Image (cartoon, grey):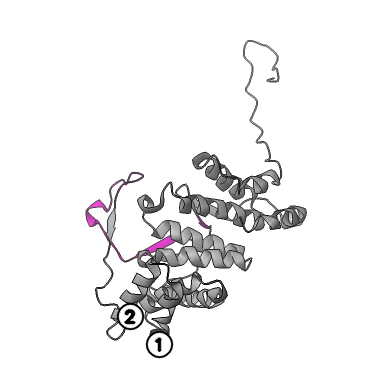
């Protein structure tokens, strides 16, 4: 696991980073967003309007994702398909090469940018380009629907882009950005598609790492324990949990004794 070498360094920095009240809240058991975000715009989902005003239970289906367009580029539609096929065959350099011209001529086409970025992401020397393209893509997606500081856009068509950009943020030690991007992936991706998979384990473990580095002990502990609960053999999160400050015990109010008996401390 590539980032455990950083743990010992950051455990020395922990006291000056602070670990007080969290600036994040959980959206469901897994996604975490800054507390200033109170509205999430889920894009490209057709919601069931009959549920408006009714109680929605956990796990209940409230809508269906729209299908992506059959034609994603009038000029480079076939190249996108060929690039996707090459990608699935592990031919990442070819997958990227097939869309180089499209990327230059249609830089505002999100489907071109997305497919080119995911191919470049698989090539170590090209990851900086993938990072730039993914950032441009997310900025473009954010601009498609008006938002402000308290809202967040999540486009279900590009769930993978949020995840991969999150890992690139981690490579650049941009921990808050990584938390946000990985959480957008959790909000965008249909849970049955990843639940219980190695990807799911990696997502939870990486959030443990991110919250360690931002000095949020409560969230780090939450994700670390969740990782071990769901994937007991995971060893990635254990060094982060081991170097957390001890949780502050919450003092329970003493109950008043009845019958004139003296209160006794519990043993």
Question: What is the crowding at mark 2: few (fewer than 14 residues within 10 Å), some, or many (at least 20)?
Answer: some
The verdict on residue 46 being magenta is: yes
Q: What element does badge 1 sit on?
A: helix
Q: How many discs mark residues in the rendered view?
A: 2
- Look at the picture and state if 76 lies above or below 180: below
Q: Which residues are magenta?
A: 32-61
Q: Are marks 2 and 1 in contact (CB under 8 Å)?
A: yes
- Look at the picture and state if 175 lies above or below 232: below
Seen in the image, is 245 located left or right of residue 164?
right
Q: Which residue is mark 2?
A: 79
Asked where in the image residue 45 lies, by quadrant, the reply is: bottom left
Residue at 63% of width from left, 20% of height from top? 256
Q: Which residue is mark 1?
A: 101
Percent x, y of residue 38:
46, 59
Q: CA distance from mark 2 to mark 1?
A: 10 Å
User: Which quarter of the figure is the N terminus placed in?
Assistant: bottom right
- Look at the picture and state if 63 lies above or below 234: below
* Foreground of the two, 44 or 36: 44
Seen in the image, is 94 located left or right of residue 69?
right
Residue at 37% of width from left, 72% of height from top? 86
Mark positioned earlier in the residue sequence (2 or 1): 2
* Foreground of the two, 259 or 135: 135
Percent x, y of residue 103:
41, 84
């Amino acid at each position: 696991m590539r980032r455990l070498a950083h743990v010992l360094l950051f455990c020395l920095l922990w006291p000056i980073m602070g670990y007080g009240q969290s600036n994040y809240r959980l959206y469901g058991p897994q996604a975490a967003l800054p507390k200033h975000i109170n509205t999430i715009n889920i894009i490209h989902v057709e919601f069931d309007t009959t549920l408006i005003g009714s109680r929605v239970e956990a796990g209940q289906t409230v809508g269906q994702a729209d299908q992506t367009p059959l034609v994603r580029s009038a000029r480079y539609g076939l190249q996108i398909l060929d690039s996707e096929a090459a990608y699935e065959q592990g031919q990442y350099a070819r997958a990227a090469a097939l869309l180089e011209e499209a990327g230059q001529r249609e830089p505002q086409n999100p489907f071109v940018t997305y497919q080119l970025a995911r191919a470049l992401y698989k090539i170590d020397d090209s990851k900086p380009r993938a990072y730039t393209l993914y950032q441009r893509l997310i900025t473009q997606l954010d601009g498609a629907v008006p938002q402000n500081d308290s809202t967040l856009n999540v486009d279900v068509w590009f769930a993978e882009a949020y995840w991969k950009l999150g890992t690139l943020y981690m490579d650049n030690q941009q921990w808050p950005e990584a938390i946000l991007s990985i959480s957008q992936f959790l909000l965008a991706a249909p849970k049955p598609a990843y639940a219980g998979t190695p990807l799911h384990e990696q997502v939870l473990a990486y959030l443990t790492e991110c919250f360690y580095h931002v000095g949020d002990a409560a969230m780090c502990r939450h994700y670390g324990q969740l990782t071990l609960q769901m994937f007991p053999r995971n060893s990635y999160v254990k060094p982060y949990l081991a170097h957390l400050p001890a949780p502050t015990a919450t003092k329970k109010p003493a109950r008043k004794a009845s019958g004139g008996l003296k209160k006794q401390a519990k043993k």
